[in-house]
Amino acid sequence: MRLALLFVLAISTVVVHFNQAPPLRPAAELISDLRAGGVTKVVYDRNWPAYGTLTWSHGPLSWNQARFDQPDDVWDPETTRLVPEALERRQGAFLAQVRAAADPGVEIVRTEGFGGPIGGSVGSPAYGRWWAPFGPVAVVAEVLAWLLMLTRPNPRYASRWAWFWMFLTGGSLFYVLLEPRPLWRGPYEVLPAPARIDGTRGFAIAVALLFGMAMVNA
């Protein structure tokens, strides 16, 4: 069970790293990419460009997202309500360019705005961008890792509070790999007592990881 859990969490970590926050590019670059070939899928929110997202893929782990550039005429300046006719006109004109530039094999998908390329995907939108059926499996694996962390007594490498904070930044993979003993160590092998991470240091590690990920995605 531990190996299976580690396998799913490892895939989940890779998928989220590559697909959670696609790099932002001008929407016009989608047309250029389509003409150059290599685009496999285009996913647009039904309310884009008023809000929502437009993404396109060069492969299951290579997505781009259109930089948000909201037109002024899709909102009524007095009522601040969406103007459906203006939105439909804007969206239709852009999608006509997309379809004209796209090869017949390019999949163009409309979502209903619930996240993920097919709408309503379970867990992170990154799972749906890679392979939608993986979403529920990844969520179950994450829940199992949390349950193991909360119910196992005396974790070796970090306190339960430390693991709690680190879980919020993807630490479940490392928990399954290291606790209650590193996966590569034998069940009867005597292990030296490690320097245990307390809750304060676990919180600091989590904050540092969040800051680092924000810098990478900037």
Image (spheres, helix red, strand yellow):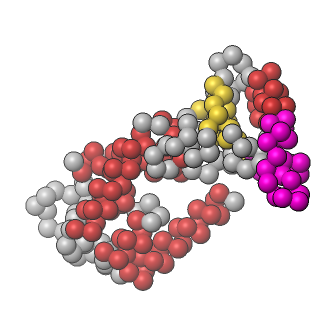
Res 201 → quadrant = bottom left
The mark tally for this picture is 0
- Residue 126 painted magenta: no
User: In the picture provided, is 153 more to the left or to the right than 198?
Assistant: left
181 relative to 101, above or below: below
Pick out the residue farthest to the top.
104
Res 111 → quadrant = top right
User: In the picture provided, is 188 more to the left or to the right than 103?
Assistant: left
Q: Residue at x 79, y 54 (%)?
A: 81
Pick out the residue farthest to the left.
188
Name the residue nearer the viewer: 201 or 111.
111
Q: Which residues, given as a range, are shown in magenta?
A: 64-90
- Residue 88 painted magenta: yes
Name the residue nearer the viewer: 99 or 63.
99
148 relative to 119, above or below: below
Q: Position of residue 162 (x, y in %)?
A: 37, 75
Q: Position of residue 79 (x, y in %)?
A: 84, 58
Q: Residue at x 36, y 43 (%)?
A: 137
Q: Residue at x 69, y 45 (%)?
A: 53
User: In the picture provided, is 48 more to the left or to the right than 187?
Assistant: right
82 relative to 56, above or below: below
